[in-house]
Image (cartoon, rainbow, N blue to C red):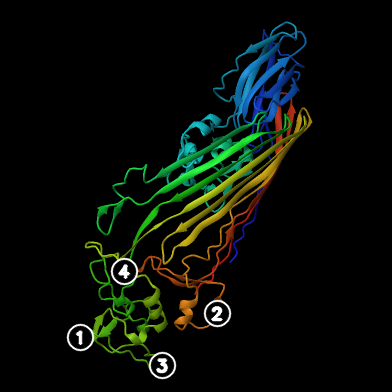
Amino acid sequence: MRLAKTAAILFVLLSVAAAAGRAQTASGEVNGTVTDKSGGLVAGATVKLTNQATKIEDWIATNSAGYFVFINVKPGSYVLGAEAKGFKTTQISPFDVGVNQTVTQTIRLEVGAVNEHVVVNAEAVMLEGSSSELGTVISERAVNDLPLNGRNFRSIGCCEGNVGIPGSGFSDASFHGQQNRSKLYFFDGIINTNIRGPTYIVIPNIDLIQEFKVVGHDAKAEFGGATGGVVDMVSASGSSSFHGSAFEYVRNDAFDARNSVTDFDPATRTPKIFPFRQNQFGATFSGHIIKNKTFFSGGYDGWRYSKPSLNLSYVPTAAEVSGDFTQQPYFSGAPHALYNPYTGASGANRTRFMCDAFGNPLPPDMTPGPTFGTQPNGIPCNKIPQALISTEIQQLFMNYAAQPNYSVAGDPGHNFIQTRSTPNNSNSFQVRIDHRLSRNDNLFFRYTEQRVSVINPIGEVGFTEGGSTGRNYGGGWVHTFRHNLILDLRAGYAGRPSVDAGQQNQHPLGLAPLKQYGFKDIDKFSGILFRLNTNAWIAGASNDFGLRGAAPRENPNWSVTPNIIWLKGSHNMKMGVWLINSKRIQKNISKI
């Protein structure tokens, strides 16, 4: 089966406001007015915005209303300056611009010569007066300095006041009281949402995140598609100087205290510390390729986790493989009743298997016809006649099924215990390039990949599950046609194709056991793997066995977002589209 759902979402956005809108770019904005000391508006003043990290400068002239605005400002620290004929040059001390944040500054010029300089403190941004949007910016300092177990940005996102955690993790978080599926994740303006569930596709290296913002359901129209909220994240770019970092975080059974609830041997009921390893390590490096023009950043993040998984289950006993279920445990106050399937379908008319007065199964009628498999009247019992048992299946279980190895009074529902490590490994890397073609053209490209491999130890030999490779990549082009007309174009891909799941519970001998015990035409299934799951035998659990094929699946998201921003006086108009092609692809597995 192939489930393919292709969606094309087109939003035509037109907003008129006192501040310019922003595309899904995880960028910010700086606007304001230039006045003289008495409050009069100064037209034609030159305003300069300087990025403290890259030293890149942008200029703009105030309009007749003394208004200026810088669109698509990368999050970071900036210095703002203004000069005009007959006034001293004024510079505002460094201030921060956050992701998807509008910063408004008023520059007051003093009468004097242009070569005279005045430095004033930046106005503290308490509220965004230019935007009605509600949200919380998680700053670069918080991202880098707060201790995070697992180095996952979600740990900080949960601190936002309107984020609730009804489930077991941030992937289940609900925003502003909405359903937990009603949220979107963006990374550098490129969608980073897994359509299979309300979660992200890749987890970036925390040292390569500039900052991110959690926005409520009152977000701008360009963030359509979710009534709950938006997590808008931006990656860190390089700067005019070189920076690097390396790290390793270690947890293991030598450092951790024993858990009095889980660290014990259930067979002996005595304390026991199982081997535990958790290592997270990596490095980052950033800088410039061409000073003040081309910048880069990149890094690697590795995760190695291994902790024994203690599992109790019930496997068929030798008596049960022979057809005798008399001693099977039960919890409903009465033994399980075993019914003869040849006496009819489920319901009141079916009858149980029959035994004689000595407890031996009565021989069934093996004559072809309507009475085949039925037994003469006797004493109801839980024993299956040997004639009705498949010899092939019986031999298979006798020789290849796990044997009971656990018996504790008061725990009749379990007779098998196994403790195996549960390796969970991942490797992530990211690279970003920023290039300033000219004052009117800026480009960037980023590639993020995360490879995950999880081994589940349940079953005969354990199996690979959850293995996948998540990718999020894309780029953008910002072009200024003139000072009041700007194009912002973004395009990218996000997806997490699953690793072939066909090796689940494969037996080390492959198809040989099936061929040995008489299964016919088995060679036609040479591309499929033998599966024998003995984790649970009691009804209601996973108790199947057979042949299993591959189960690949993928959820690709391709998106393109062109936006035009037109500045008219102190009003800004924004028009654009968000085109996204999302598919949910899954192939049926072959199983006998």
The residue pinned by badge 3 equals 368
Can residue 489 be seen here? The reply is no
The residue pinned by badge 4 equals 404
Cα–Cα span, label 4 and label 2: 32 Å
Of badges 3 and 2, the one in the foreground is: 2
Q: Quadrant of residue 589?
A: bottom right
Can residue 103 be seen here? The reply is yes
Cα–Cα span, label 2 and label 1: 45 Å
Cα–Cα span, label 1 and label 3: 28 Å
Q: Secondary structure at mark 3?
A: loop
Q: Secondary structure at mark 2?
A: helix
Q: Looking at the picture, how far across and down is residue 346, in whole percent? A: 36, 77
- Sequence-earlier tag: 1 or 3: 1
Residue type at mark 3?
Pro
Residue drawn at the location 62% of the way across and 28% of the way down: 76
Cα–Cα span, label 3 and label 2: 30 Å
Residue type at mark 1?
Phe
How dense is the environment of label 2, judged by Cα within 10 Å: few (below 14), some, or many (20 and up)? few
Residue furthest to the bottom: 367
The residue pinned by badge 1 equals 358
Of badges 4 and 3, the one in the foreground is: 4
Residue drawn at the location 72% of the way across and 21% of the way down: 48
The residue pinned by badge 2 equals 523
